[in-house]
């Protein structure tokens, strides 16, 4: 949805990087399989980022069998780019709050950095182990992550993009049409053409 697209564009500008890669997963490890197939979700993402040259899609997790583990993806990318280039894995606060349920989560920093994207209304998780891990590896400014290949964590407060996938799916089920600030018209048309999310 447009909240994700706007956040990714904002991130690219803030870090002054050429490309932010978006990685749709095949089979989430911590929740049930999405309603849309991997192919449908890839198509929706490609439509959502069309015309945004700073955004690209990385489909490696869609081609991998079994649960989509971020650690495997980071290890693959690290192997491709070599040991020196910075690699930053970005996640929202909701994902960060559940990080301890991730596969070998403490090894993520062996391959790259973690950047937690927060919104103005976000509140930090309270788990002591997670907060200790964060405090041990944190740097104060997201741009500092670009100075080394791996091993650090930071957070970046983004603008308010009050759009949620749950809210959009609910609108669609009720026969309401999300506006263009919530969902790109091309994505909305594709959802309708595929009869996704309860649309008949």
Image (spheres, rainbow, N blue to C red):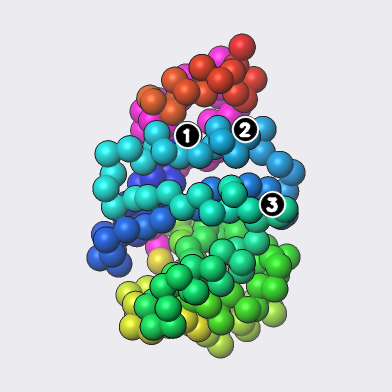
Taking the image as shown, residue 86 lies to the left or right of residue 167, namely left
Q: Which residues are magenta?
A: 157-184
Image-quadrant location for residue 136? bottom right
Taking the image as shown, residue 73 lies to the left or right of residue 10, namely right
Tag 3 and tag 2, C-beta contact below 8 Å: no
**Which is nearer the eye, 34 or 76?**
76
Mark 1 / mark 2, whichever is N-terminal: 2
Q: Is residue 58 above or below residue 176?
A: below
**Which is nearer the eye, 11 or 82?**
82
Residue furthest top in the image: 200
Image-quadrant location for residue 158? bottom left
**Residue that badge 1 annotates:** 44
User: Where residue 16 appears, x then y in whole percent?
Assistant: 25, 65
| Placement of the C terminus among the 4 image quadrants | top right
Q: CA distance from mark 3 to mark 2?
A: 17 Å
Tag 1 and tag 2, C-beta contact below 8 Å: yes
Q: Secondary structure at mark 1?
A: helix
User: Where residue 144 appears, x then y in whole percent?
Assistant: 35, 80
Q: Is residue 157 above or below residue 161?
A: below
How crowded is the residue under tag 2: few (<14 C-alpha within 10 Å), some, or many (20+)? some
Give the residue displayed 58% in from the left and 48% down from the top. 62
Mark 3 / mark 2, whichever is N-terminal: 2
Q: Secondary structure at mark 2?
A: loop
How crowded is the residue under tag 3: few (<14 C-alpha within 10 Å), some, or many (20+)? few
| Residue 77 visible in the picture | yes
Q: CA distance from mark 1 to mark 2?
A: 10 Å
Give the residue displayed 56% in from the left and 15% down from the top. 175
**Residue that badge 2 annotates:** 36
Give the residue displayed 39% in from the left and 45% down from the top. 5
**Residue that badge 3 annotates:** 65
Q: Is residue 190 magenta?
A: no
Give the residue displayed 40% in from the left and 63% down from the top. 157
């Amino acid at each position: 949805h447009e909240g994700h697209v706007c956040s990714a564009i904002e991130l690219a500008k803030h870090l002054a990087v050429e490309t932010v890669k978006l990685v749709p997963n095949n089979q989430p490890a911590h929740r049930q399989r999405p309603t849309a197939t991997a192919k449908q979700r890839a198509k929706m993402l490609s439509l959502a980022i069309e015309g945004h040259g700073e955004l690209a899609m990385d489909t490696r997790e869609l081609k991998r069998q079994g649960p989509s583990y971020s650690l495997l993806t980071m290890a693959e990318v690290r192997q491709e780019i070599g040991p020196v280039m910075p690699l930053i894995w970005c996640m929202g606060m909701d994902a960060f709050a559940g990080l301890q349920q991730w596969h070998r989560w403490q090894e993520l920093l062996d391959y790259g950095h973690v950047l937690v994207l927060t919104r103005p209304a976000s509140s930090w998780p309270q788990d002591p182990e997670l907060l200790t891990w964060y405090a041990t590896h944190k740097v104060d400014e997201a741009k500092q992550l670009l100075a080394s290949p791996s091993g650090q964590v930071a957070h970046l407060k983004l603008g308010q993009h009050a759009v949620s996938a749950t809210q959009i799916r609910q609108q669609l089920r009720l026969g309401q049409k999300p506006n263009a600030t919530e969902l790109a018209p091309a994505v909305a048309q594709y959802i309708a053409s595929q009869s996704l999310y309860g649309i008949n």
